[in-house]
Amino acid sequence: ARVVVLASGTGSLLRSLLAAAVGDYPAQIVAVGVDRDCAATGHAEAAGVPSFKVALGAYPDRAAWDAALTESVAAHEPDLVVSAGFMKILGPEFMARFGGRIVNTHPALLPSFPGAHAVRDALAYGVKVTGSTVHLVDEGVDTGPVLAQEAVVIEDDDDEATLHERIKTVERRLLVEVLAAVATRGVVSDGRKAVIPK
Ligand code: GRF
């Protein structure tokens, strides 16, 4: 399957996907899209994968940005889009074009702690277990059907950085596994539930 990865952060999830996407791994990364200058571009270049930037600030409004991002991603004819730390909500035009084929990772056990500060929120709440969720993206924020989850225990001396790094260690493995499964066996989703056929 042809995969376009969207990233905004340090790109450590992207780096894991690039490292996995060699040989007969079923999900080949054909391009990387970013919304700002970030390390993800460097990881793409290092792997010989083309990258493109669609920065919100370069467009008159969000609809124009949504159209530009949709066009930039569509140019690579992806079968799947992976949001790996892409810190923007995907717009209606993008969802119309790629909905049902967009996978996201979230550093909490959804529906707990949605949004941009999941790790900080879990720590602040005082839960003993959090984790990683891989899900299909729908029009909401972190609300799409769940594909895979794995728990991560919070240690008493954890801070946001140590906990997030431990969650990312799980995410990197989970995302690579889920992407391979979805790429080879697809996803059957009826609204709320999504199942990757065995
Ligand atoms: C990951 O924890 C992801 O779940 C969240 O943003 C983080 C991205 O990390 N959405 P990185 O930029 O790939 O290191």
Image: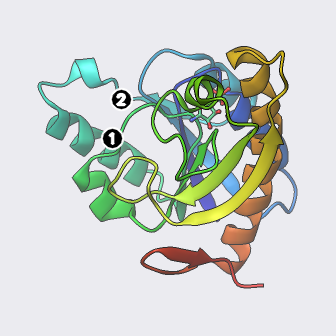
Figure quadrant of the N terminus: bottom right
| Disc 2: CA contacts within 10 A as few (<14), some (14-19) or many (>=20) | some
Residue 7 placement (x, y as % from top left): 54, 33
Who's the residue at 82% across and 60% down the image? 25
| Disc 1 to disc 2: CB gap under 8 Å | yes
Disc 1 Cβ-to-ligand 1 distance below 8 Å:
no
Residue furthest out toward the front: 126
Q: Quadrant of ligand 1?
A: top right
Q: Which residue is mark 1?
A: 69
Q: Is residue 161 toward the left or the right of residue 20 in the image? A: left
Above or below, comparing residue 62 to residue 42 in the picture: below
Question: Which mark, by number, is residue 58?
Answer: none
Q: Amino acid at mark 2?
A: Val
Q: Which residue is nearer to you in this view: 104 or 162?
A: 162
Who's the residue at 65% across and 25% down the image? 123
Above or below, comparing residue 182 to residue 82 in the picture: below
Residue 119 placement (x, y as % from top left): 62, 28
Instruction: State the count of labels.
Output: 2
Q: Is residue 184 toward the left or the right of residue 141 in the image? A: right
Above or below, comparing residue 8 to residue 14 in the picture: above
Q: Which residue is nearer to you in this view: 136 or 186?
A: 136
Answer yes or no: is residue 56 visible. Answer: yes
Q: Secondary structure at mark 2?
A: loop
Q: Secondary structure at mark 1?
A: helix
| Disc 1: CA contacts within 10 A as few (<14), some (14-19) or many (>=20) | many
Q: Amino acid at mark 1?
A: Leu
Q: Is residue 81 toward the left or the right of residue 170 in the image? A: left
Q: Which residue is mark 2?
A: 54
Residue 141 placement (x, y as % from top left): 39, 47
Dot 1 or dot 2: first in sequence order is 2
Q: Is residue 186 toward the left or the right of residue 157 in the image? A: left
Figure quadrant of the C terminus: bottom right
